[in-house]
Structures are given as C-alpha cells and as structure tokens.
Image (tube, helix red, strand yellow):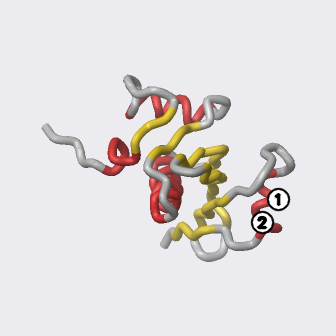
Amino acid sequence: MYVMKPILEYDVLDLLNNGRFEGEMEGYILSDGGDLFGWSLFRIDGDVTTMLDVNAPSGSFLDGLIRASVAYGEARGATKFSLNPDVADFVKYKEIFFENEGFVIPNDKLFTPCEG
C-alpha cells in the first residue's frame, strides 16, 4: 500500500532540496512504508502554495502529490497555487489540465470535479 505523508523532519527537506531553493518549505513523501518512491517540495506564501519540485514515478502519483501539497497549503489559508515552470513534469501537468490558466491558479480549479 502506498502512503503520502507530510515531511516533518527538516533534515529530510534539506536532503531533498539539496540547496536549490531558499527559505522555508514543506514537502510530502510517497512510500510503500519502507521504500521512498516519490516526493514533493512546496512553499506556502500567503495565499499561494508554490510547487517547487516533484519526483513522481507516474502521472497518477504526480497528480496525487500536487493535490496533497495544495490541500496542505489550503488548510493553512492558501487559496491559489502555482507550478514551478522550470520543472518539466509541472509544465506538462499544466498543459494538460490548466492550459488556459495563468501562472497562479485558484485552488477550486484543482478540486472542483469536471462537469460534462
């Protein structure tokens, strides 16, 4: 069974960040209880959750890590999110799901089900 959990240890955040992003950040890990399969790094700046980086083994896990991260930010008052344009997986995700949106996207665009 796969689980996603917030990263609560700063040493783990520092290890995954590897000096690339400055300032405080949050993260999620994806594991099967033993092995690490993926992770996300993000920052909550006021009302925006900024997705900094991600490592996901597939598209469905990418979606799950983004949703978990944005929901974490929303629980702390963020109403919008953005995806780092320097990360190829984020660029592809935005092209597929948010092609007509700007750089900062309202959370309800992510959490409102499609109607059709």
User: Residue 12 got which mark?
Assistant: 2
Residue 71 is situated, as x and y percent measured from the top left of the image, at 45, 59
Q: Residues within 10 Å of mark 2 (few under 14, many from 20)?
A: few
Residue in the picture at 13% in, 37% down: 116
User: Residue 15 got which mark?
Assistant: 1
- Residue sitting nearer the eye, 51 or 91: 51
- Residue sitting nearer the eye, 63 or 78: 78
Element under disc 1: helix
Q: Is residue 19 visible?
A: yes
- Residue sitting nearer the eye, 112 or 96: 112
Marks counted in the figure total: 2
Seen as rendered, the residue at the extreme left is 116
The three-letter code of the residue at mark 1 reads Leu
Apparent side of residue 22 relative to residue 103 in the rendered image (left or right):
right
Apparent side of residue 93 relative to residue 18 in the rendered image (left or right):
left
Residue 105 is situated, as x and y percent measured from the top left of the image, at 44, 37
Residue contact between numbered discs 1 and 2, judged by CB atoms under 8 Å: yes
Q: Taking 90 as reference, is 63 above or below it?
A: below
Q: Is residue 57 visible?
A: no
Element under disc 2: helix
Apparent side of residue 33 relative to residue 93 in the rendered image (left or right):
right
Residue 82 is situated, as x and y percent measured from the top left of the image, at 53, 39
